[in-house]
Amino acid sequence: MKNIYKTYYKILICLSVLVFASCSNEFLEIVPKGQLIGEKVVDYNKLFYNLNLVNLGSASGQAYLGAESTAFEPYFSNTELRRQRFFKWEANVYDNDENMGELEVPMENLYIYNKIINEVLIATDGTEEQKRVLQAEAKAGRAWVYFLMVNYFGMPYNDQTSSTDLGFPIITVADLAATDFKRATVQENYDLIIKDLTEAIPDLPTRTDSRFRFTRAAAKGLLGKVYTFMGKFAEARPLLNEALVEQYNLGIEVGLIDYNEQYERPNAQLDPQNLYGKQIVVAAIANRQYELVVKPEVMALYNENDLRFQLLYRNTLQSGAPIPIDGAYKKNVGTSQSQIGVRVPELYLLSAEVKCRLNDLSGAVDDVEFLRERRLMTGFTEVPAEIASDREALLRFIFDERLREFALEGYHWFDMRRLTVDPDIPTPVSSYTHKIYNADGSLQDEFQLTQERLVIKFSPTVMDQNPNLINND
């Protein structure tokens, strides 16, 4: 992490010159240890207009770890080595001289959020309310980053083990010279996330002009998701419900896109399905990239009346030749950007999941069908009656709907992790597999997920610079 902070010392200086050209000269002063100094409220406000707070770049390992995909030659061997290793669930993904894609931009995010949290209240000019709003936005942003980090490096949340399972270091100071990072526990990570969001929500704005800025509705949605991942469904339910109600009063267009009317994948700023925008690059969902395709078992979850199947998938190569794996399909969403912030479709599915687990089956069905009415052709959106009346069957259907909605976009990996400790539908780790096929469709190799690979290991560069950091096995 020290090496990452060193890297971003230079980047942050460059960004400050670009973003704060209109700010006071005082802001651009650098103290000897390399930390930016802000003085005015406007300086801290403009920190939020750093594009790297939106574009997380190659923090995308989750898209290649998800078991909904399969691969074939020669495309797989031609892709980035890091992606190949993630797909094979290898322990050591990074070479000795590589920085971690999963840490580079998120660590920059963390630095910026910590700067704002710790300093904005003593900024000159501006009102106390303006300062509290900016601090609240930064706390919500820090919580978002920590939720990603604990799901990269910590084991799935478990009441019995999370107080001892190692998570991510608690970093709450913007200190570029810090080197003595030690891992906190998973429980401590979640405690920080909940504290940040709980403190932030009352001070966050209810309206906005940018979906890149946290609102009260987005923070409630995130906290509802956090509680869902912790298995605290009663706590999650009101937050998810409030987020879904408040989305309509944000001052910008927010809501589900109806595929019956049109399909479009607008950029992150214009996408109404972004309650809060963050994105990663996933080459596999771009038009000409065939490094991964969706496996036949997952494609079987769609039917011909599903507009996602009609609009987003094809079973041929660019040349028109068939994909050599029978039943596998290429996903193409129209861009390589996967939206992973606070997403409206996910909030409906999380709400459905929580209601189902709390035995409100009719409420769960309503939420799922609200999404399906905008994803399937008219007349084919209902949850089958035999599923709608069966709690376990409905819960499995909701997770299948998550796959239909988010395949290859980085969501399934996090679902896989929590399903291994799920109290209602526990899923063996060993049930998850990846396969690589030859160009003629014959099986080349198969990989089985292990308990150890539910977490990512820190790279050699991170370990070299942080001698007190304990790595994952």
Image (tube, rainbow, N blue to C red):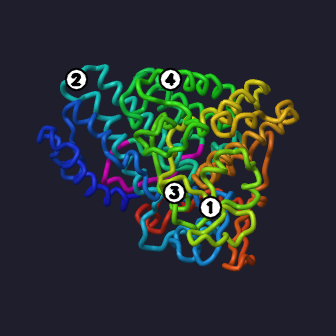
| Extreme residue toward the right, this view | 386
Residue 43 appears in view: yes
User: How far apart are the alpha carbons under marks 3 and 4?
Assistant: 30 Å
Which mark identifies residue 98? none
* Tag 4: amino acid: Tyr
Q: What residue type is labelled 1?
A: Lys
Measured from the top left, where is residue 357 in percent x and y? 76, 31
Indicate which label's residue lies in the foreground, 2 or 1: 1
**Mark 4 — residue?**
248
Report which residue position mark 1 lands on.
330
Q: Distance between the residues labelled 2 and 1?
A: 52 Å
Instruction: Please give the range of residues in magenta.
Output: 173-186
> Badge 1: how crowded within 10 Å, few (<14), some, or many (20+)?
many
Report how far apart the C-alphas of labels 1 and 4 lie in the structure. 34 Å
* Disc 3 from disc 2: Cα separation: 38 Å
Gap between marks 1 and 3 measured at Cα: 19 Å
Give the number of the mark in front: 3 or 4: 4
Tell me the quadrant of the picture where the N terminus can be found: bottom left
Q: Considering only vertical position in the picture, is 321 above or below 465?
A: below
In magenta segment, residue 45: no
Mark toward the viewer: 3 or 2: 3
Residue designated by label 2: 126
Query: Mark 3 is on which residue type?
Result: Ser
In-image side of 345 versus 97 (left or right): right
Of mark 2 and mark 4, the one earlier in the sequence is 2
- State which tag comes first along the sequence, 3 or 4: 3
**Residue 177 is a magenta residue:** yes
Q: Which of 186 and 408 is in front in this view?
A: 408
Q: Residue at x 68, y 59 (%)?
A: 67
Q: Which of pointers 2 and 4 indicates the residue nearer the eye?
A: 4
- Label 4 crowd (10 A; few <14 / some 14-19 / many >=20): some
Q: Name the residue under label 3.
A: 60
